[in-house]
Amino acid sequence: MSAVRHRLRNRGARSPATLNLVSLMDIFTILVFFLMVNSSQVEVIETTTAIKLPDSVSEERPEERLSILVSADDLIVQGQIVASATDAMRSTGDVIEGLSVALALQAEKRRQQLADPSAFEGSVTIMGDRQLPYALLKRVLLTCQQHDFTRIALAVNRVGREES
C-alpha cells in the first residue's frame, strides 16, 4: 500500500506546472483602459533642455497652435530654425527678419486651409526661457502681430496650486 501512495505522490510532482493567466489579463485590461482614457487629456509641446519654462497654476489647457521656440541661441518655428537670437537682438528694427518670413509662410498656409481666408485667427504659442530678455520677447511679439498672429499664448510649466 505504501508503494501505491509513493507512486501517486511522485506522479503529482511530475505533472507540468500551470499558470493562471486570468488575473494577469485583468490587470492588463485595466491598464490599457486607464491609458486610453488618460491619453486624450495630455498635450505634449516639444521643447528642449535649453529652455526652462516659467511655472503657472492655471487650470485652463491651451489649444493647438503654431509654436515658436525662443532659446538663448535660436528662434525656431514648428521645429525649423528661422533666426539667430543674437542676430535678432543686434538688429535695429522691431521686426525679426527670419521670423517674419517664416510667419508669412505659415499664415499663408493656414489661410489656404480655410474655406474663408478672412476667418483666419492667428494663434501662436511662444516657448521662451524664463531668463529671456524682454527686448527679444517684445520683438517676437511685434513680428507675430505684423503677420496677424494676434492670439498669443506663452508656454509655462503647470504646477499644483498650494492650498491656503
Image (cartoon, rainbow, N blue to C red):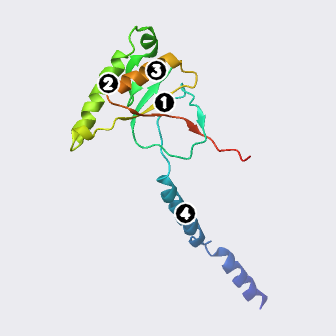
Residue tagged 4 = 28
Residue tagged 2 = 102
| Amino acid on which disc 2 is placed | Ala
Residue at the extreme bottom: 1
Query: Which quadrant of the figure has residue 7?
Result: bottom right
Q: Quick one: label 3, few (<14), some, or many (20+) residues within 10 Å? A: few
**Relative to 1, 72 lies left or right:** left
Q: Are marks 2 and 4 in contact (CB under 8 Å)?
A: no
Q: Nearer the viewer, residue 8 or 164?
A: 164
Which x, y percent locates residue 13?
68, 75
Residue tagged 1 = 127
Quadrant of the snapshot with the N terminus:
bottom right
The residue positioned 30% from the left and 31% from the top of the image is 106
Q: Nearer the viewer, residue 99 or 46?
A: 99
Q: Is residue 19 visible?
A: no
- Label 2 vs label 4: CA separation? 46 Å
Q: Are marks 1 and 4 in contact (CB under 8 Å)?
A: no
Residue at the extreme right: 2
Q: Between disc 2 and disc 1, whose residue precedes?
A: 2
Q: Is residue 91 visible?
A: yes
What is the total number of numbered labels drawn onto the structure image? Answer: 4
Disc number for residue 138:
3
